[in-house]
Amino acid sequence: MRIDCPHCGERGSAEFSYLGAADPKRPAANASAEAWHDYVYLRENPAGPLRELWQHVHGCRQWLVVTRDTRNHLVLGVEVCRGRAV
Amino acid sequence: MAFCQSGPAMGYSIFSLIRHALTGNRHWTPVWRDPEPKEFYDTIMVGRGGHGLSTAYYLAKEHGVTDVAVVEKGYLGSGNVGRNTTIIRSNYLLPHNTHFYEKSLQLWEGLEQDINYNAMVSQRGVLNLYHSDSQRDAYARRGNAMRLAGADSELLDREQVRAMVPGLDMENGRFPIRGGLLQRRGGNVRHDAVAWGYARAADRRGVDMLQNTEVIGIRVEGGRVKGVETTRGFIGANRVGLAAAGNSSRVAAMAGLRLPIETHVLQAFVSEAVKPLVHQVVTYGAGHFYISQSDKGGLVFGGDLDGYSSYAQRGNLPLVEDVMESAVQLFPQVSRLRYLRQWGGVMDMSMDGSPIIDRTPIEGLFLNCGWCYGGFKATPASGWCFAHTIATGTAHALNAGFRLDRFATGAVLSEAGHGAQPNKH
Ligand SMILES: Cc1cc2nc3c(=O)[nH]c(=O)nc-3n(C[C@H](O)[C@H](O)[C@H](O)COP(=O)(O)OP(=O)(O)OC[C@H]3O[C@@H](n4cnc5c(N)ncnc54)[C@H](O)[C@@H]3O)c2cc1C
Ligand SMILES: [Zn+2]
């Protein structure tokens, strides 16, 4: 599996570390316990395209949003992760 | 009795084996039926892996619930029950886990008599190596927790390990082996035979096995489950139990549920056959690696998850390299072996690394999932507890901690303490 880093070019997945789904949005600090539970624990876990957070730890160290098909590991798109706390 | 018949109605014995051997093994008959789906069952199990099968069996045996169908999208053993590395053990730390897995080990010990099937339960011992003082302390604590829960454990020093597993590289420069935590009652079980044995035993108690029948919807009316939509039509039921392992999130989503689960890929490997090298299951304490040897002589080994969400049932090369490096660190002589086969399975990784056996907010719908990479050893106790939960509507004491709402209440069960990060468990 290879990921095309916008800064470094196409690199093997072993250069990156994985955090998980990119779409759960961090609730406000005073949000309900239920909202925090949803954010921390519940996942869509789709069989198909998934937007996820990878960090190029052995390269530019940027956080990336990688869209990848979980059925066949095809990388469908890579963007730099901007304007959000990871 | 007809000389050559040994159909579903008859048990296996040394006499039936001899009889069939003398007639060239030409007269064995299918050991379970292939029935047409009925319109309605009291209880439907979704997923015919180890857990769906054992649940059906214990529903019939322990609770007299025999109007049961087990619905499977593929063939018997196509999921993780036929893909795992067959290790059984009860060497956990947290009370809910130790008691549950110890129950499972006890059920394994009586399983072959119970289901009249040779599952090749081999209590060859599971040895977890330690490589530092702090790791020894952690294993001593774990061993004590195991004994408090009624399981067996022994803390071995370096010389005891050397004598027990002569092939190990004890003096590894980076991670010398200082000793190990041994559970003698742990070991291996032939995984396919577990699926076949439970399928046959459940079939004989009247359970219908429906293969090539994919569940594509779950019908819920007024907060109550009514049955399942399948590729062979709608089948009604009073109760539906989900045991779909790596596909749990997808099946639960059919009933509108979101689960604390991510699906990840785990790989395993088998080498060419060699003379006896490892008589136990040995795990590496300084890397994620474990190894045992099959009766045919192949070394069976595996390691960590690949580390990313996957439904592909196959992994990638970095993990292969990592596993091979660990193998050579422990047993340098295997560097000259070739590996024959490699495969992957999709794991239902829960957010705290422990399983879920519980009711759901939908009346009549029950959930069994979150087995991570350790659900094979759980097969008997999982089915036993899930059958209890389905039949009585309440959890047994043994699965009382495996609640779905524990993530909301804060009563998580995390052996590793890594937080809600499934690729780290
Ligand atoms: C490489 C590897 C090594 C492992 N090693 C060990 C080990 O040494 N020890 C240990 O304890 N555990 C181990 N495990 C984990 C263990 O195999 C699993 O936790 C356990 O098998 C899961 O339960 P199961 O047997 O019921 O799953 P499965 O056999 O996967 O059963 C689930 C079934 O549900 C079916 N299904 C899914 N969706 C649908 C649908 N919509 N309709 C109908 N049917 C559906 C699937 O086809 C599948 O047959 C390992 C797993 C892997 C992959
Ligand atoms: Zn980069």
Image: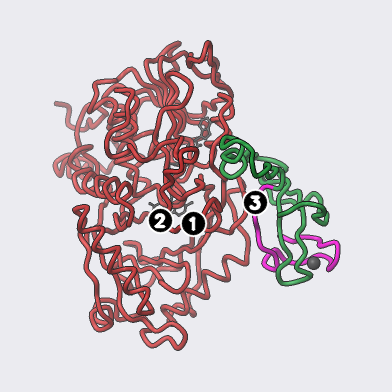
Chain colours: A green, B red
Q: What amino acid type is highlighted by mark number 1?
A: His
Position of A13 with respect to B419 (left or right) is right
Residue A2 in magenta stretch: yes
Q: Is residue B237 magenta?
A: no
Instruction: Say which mark, if any, is on residue B425.
Output: 1
Which quadrant of the structure image shows residue B41? top left
Closer to the camera: disc 2 or disc 1?
A: 2
Tell me the residue that label 2 is attached to. Answer: B415
Q: Nearer the viewer, residue B16 or B386?
A: B386
For marks 2 and 1, the one nearer the N-term is: 2
Between B322 and B31, the one nearer to me in the picture: B322
**Residue range highlighted in magenta:** A1-21
Q: Measured from the top left, where is residue B290 in percent x and y?
A: 41, 66
CA neighbours of label 1 inside 10 A, class few (<14), some (14 to 19), many (20+): many
Q: Secondary structure at mark 2?
A: loop
Q: Is residue A59 above or below residue B349?
A: below
Mark pair 2, 3: CA separation: 21 Å
Quarter of the figure that contains the N terminus of chain B: top left
Viewer-closest of B211 and B401: B401
Q: Which residue is mark 3?
A: A20
Marks 3/1: CA distance?
A: 14 Å
Residue B81 appearing in the image: no
Residue A11 appears anywhere in the view: yes
User: What type is the residue that disc 2 sits on?
Assistant: Glu
Q: The residue marked by circle 3 belongs to what chain?
A: A
